C-alpha cells in the first residue's frame, strides 16, 4: 500500500508521498550480495532503509532502485559532473542526514542536461524534460519554479547518462537521483539509463513520468509504496499505508510504460504542503467605531490550499485573555462595547493545517467608522 512521505533532517518513520508500477526500476525485487557490511552500508542501514532494497554496485549503492550513495563518500562519483563545483568531493553523501526540502532562498531550481544525453534521436530526453518542468510549474500555490538552463555552472541539478558513474545502472533500472543536500538546495544529480531493458525504446510520455518522478526525489520526496521500510515522515492530508494512492507519481512500482497520467490529487496535496506558499490572513473592516454600533469584519486569506477555516476571538475592557472562538465564519459581526475599545484576533487555517493569525484594535469613538 502507498502513503505520502518526505525525507527529513531528523529521520522518522511514518507514512509519506505516492505512485504504483516503476519509475526507478521495473521490478522492486532486488538481488543483493551484502554479506560484508561496510561502514558506508552500515550508514545507509542506520538511516532506516531495508537491506533487501539495497543493491551493491562497483562504485555506489543503489537504494530502493532510485537513490545513489557513493562508496567513497563523495557527492559526485568519478567521471560525474557536479552541479555545484564548490562542493565536489565533499564527504557527506553517506554520512549526512537527508535534507528536509528546497528552501525559499533556492526556490528557482535550475536544471541542466549534460552532453552525455544525446541531442537527437530516441535517447534525447530534453523535450520530455521540458514537459516535466511544465507539469511542476503548472501546479498552483507552490513557491518552487523549475527551469532548464544551458550551462552546468548555472545548474542546481544536472541530468546525465548513467555511463558517467562507471558502474552503469542495472538493465531494469530506468534512472536514479540524489536527495536534497541538506543545505536548502535540491539533490544535485540525476542519471538516466539510456540502455534500459536491452535498449527498449521509451515513449515521450514515459520519459516525462520518469523525469517527474526523479525530480520529485531531488526535491526530497520519497517512495510511497516502500515508505514503511524507509526513513520518511508522513505528509499530512495524504492517505495512510492501509489506504494508499495507486495513482501517485512517486510510487516506485508504477509501470511507466503506461506513460504520463498526471499528478494524483494526493501528489498535489503533498507538494503543496511541502512547497506551498505560506498562508496569509488579514482582517478587513472598521478600525474605529461608536458605542453600541453594529459592525462587521471580514477575513481575507491568500496562499496555502483552500478551503480555509476561521476562528475569531475578542477581548475588551480590562480583560487580558482572548474570548472564543466566538465565530468560525469568514466574517464576524459584533456590537461595539460601551466605552471600551475592541480587540479582534483571527486565526485562519488552510486545508493542510497550516495556519496564520492576525489581530486588530478597534478604537471606540464618536462618528462614522473609518476603514483602513
Image (cartoon, rainbow, N blue to C red):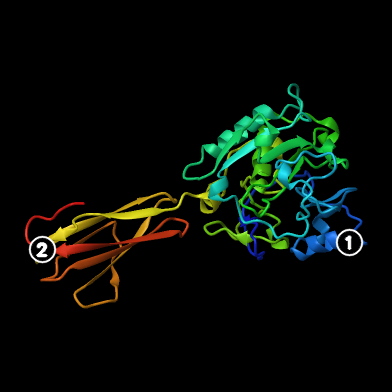
Which secondary structure lies at badge 2?
loop
Residue 313 percent across, percent down from the top left:
28, 68
Q: Is residue 20 left or right of residue 191?
A: left
Residue depth check, mark 1 versus mark 2: number of the one nearer the observer:
2
Alpha carbons under labels 1 and 2: distance apart: 76 Å
Q: Position of residue 173 (x, y in %)?
A: 80, 42
Q: In the image, what residue occupies the spot 60% across and 41% down?
A: 109
Q: Quadrant of residue 132?
A: top right
Q: Which residue is mark 2?
A: 365
Q: Quadrant of residue 326?
A: bottom left
Whether tag 1 and tag 2 are in contact, CB under 8 A, the answer is: no
Q: Residue at x 47, y 42 (%)?
A: 140
* Residue at disc 1, secondary structure: loop
Q: Residue at x 47, y 45 (%)?
A: 141
The image shows residue 235, relative to residue 120, as above or below, that is below
- Quadrant assignment for the N terminus: bottom right
Residue 320 versus residue 32: which sits nearer the camera?
Answer: 320
Q: Which residue is mark 1?
A: 38
Residue 69 showing in the rendered view: yes
Give the mark nearest the N terminus, 1 or 2: 1
Q: Position of residue 169 (x, y in %)?
A: 84, 42
Please indicate, yes or no, whether residue 259 appears anywhere in the rendered image.
no
Measured as percent of width and height from the top left, residue 74 is found at 80, 51
- Mark 2 Cα-neighbour bin, 10 Å: few <14, some 14–19, many ≥20: some
Q: Residue furthest left?
A: 367
Q: Residue at x 52, y 53 (%)?
A: 273
Where residue 48 is drawn, which disc sits there? none
- The mark tally for this picture is 2
Amino acid at each position: 500500500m502507498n502513503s505520502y512521505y518526505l525525507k527529513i533532517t531528523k529521520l522518522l518513520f511514518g507514512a509519506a508521498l505516492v505512485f504504483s508500477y516503476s519509475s526507478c526500476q521495473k521490478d522492486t525485487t532486488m538481488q543483493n550480495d551484502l554479506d560484508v557490511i561496510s561502514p558506508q552500508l552500515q550508514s545507509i542501514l542506520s538511516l532506516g532503509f531495508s537491506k533487501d532494497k539495497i543493491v551493491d554496485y562497483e562504485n555506489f549503492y543503489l537504494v530502493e532502485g532510485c537513490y545513489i550513495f557513493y562508496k567513497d563518500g563523495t557527492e559526485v562519483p568519478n567521471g560525474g559532473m557536479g552541479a555545484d563545483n564548490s562542493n565536489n568531493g565533499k564527504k557527506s553523501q553517506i554520512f549526512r542526514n537527508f535534507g528536509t526540502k528546497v528552501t525559499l532562498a533556492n526556490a528557482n531550481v535550475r536544471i541542466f542536461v549534460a552532453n552525455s544525453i544525446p541531442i537527437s534521436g530516441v535517447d534525447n530526453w530534453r523535450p520530455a524534460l521540458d514537459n516535466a518542468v511544465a507539469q511542476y510549474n503548472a501546479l498552483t500555490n507552490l513557491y518552487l519554479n523549475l527551469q532548464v538552463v544551458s550551462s552546468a555552472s548555472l545548474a542546481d541539478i544536472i541530468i546525465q547518462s548513467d555511463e558517467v558513474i562507471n558502474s552503469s545502472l542495472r538493465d531494469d533500472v530506468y534512472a536514479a537521483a540524489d536527495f536534497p543536500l541538506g543545505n536548502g538546495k535540491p539533490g544535485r544529480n540525476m542519471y538516466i539509463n539510456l540502455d534500459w531493458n536491452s535498449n527498449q525504446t521509451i515513449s515521450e510520455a514515459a520519459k516525462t513520468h520518469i523525469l517527474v518522478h526523479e525530480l520529485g526525489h531531488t526535491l526530497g520526496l520519497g517512495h510511497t509504496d516502500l515508505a514503511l521500510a524507509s526513513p520518511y515522515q508522513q505528509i499530512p492530508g495524504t492517505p495512510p499505508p492501509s489506504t494508499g494512492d495507486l495513482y501517485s507519481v512517486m510510487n516506485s512500482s508504477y509501470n511507466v510504460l503506461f506513460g504520463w497520467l498526471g499528478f494524483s490529487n494526493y501528489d498535489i496535496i503533498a507538494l503543496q504542503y511541502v512547497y506551498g506558499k505560506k498562508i496569509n490572513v488579514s482582517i478587513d473592516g472598521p478600525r474605529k467605531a461608536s458605542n453600541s454600533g453594529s459592525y462587521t469584519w471580514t477575513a481575507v486569506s491568500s496562499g496555502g490550499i483552500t478551503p480555509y477555516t476561521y476562528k475569531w476571538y475578542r477581548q475588551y475592557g480590562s480583560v487580558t485573555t482572548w474570548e472564543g472562538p466566538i465565530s468560525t465564519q469568514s466574517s464576524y459581526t459584533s456590537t461595539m462595547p460601551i466605552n471600551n475599545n475592541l480587540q479582534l484576533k483571527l486565526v485562519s487555517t488552510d486545508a493542510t493545517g497550516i495556519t496564520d493569525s492576525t489581530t486588530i484594535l478597534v478604537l471606540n469613538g464618536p462618528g462614522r467608522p473609518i476603514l483602513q
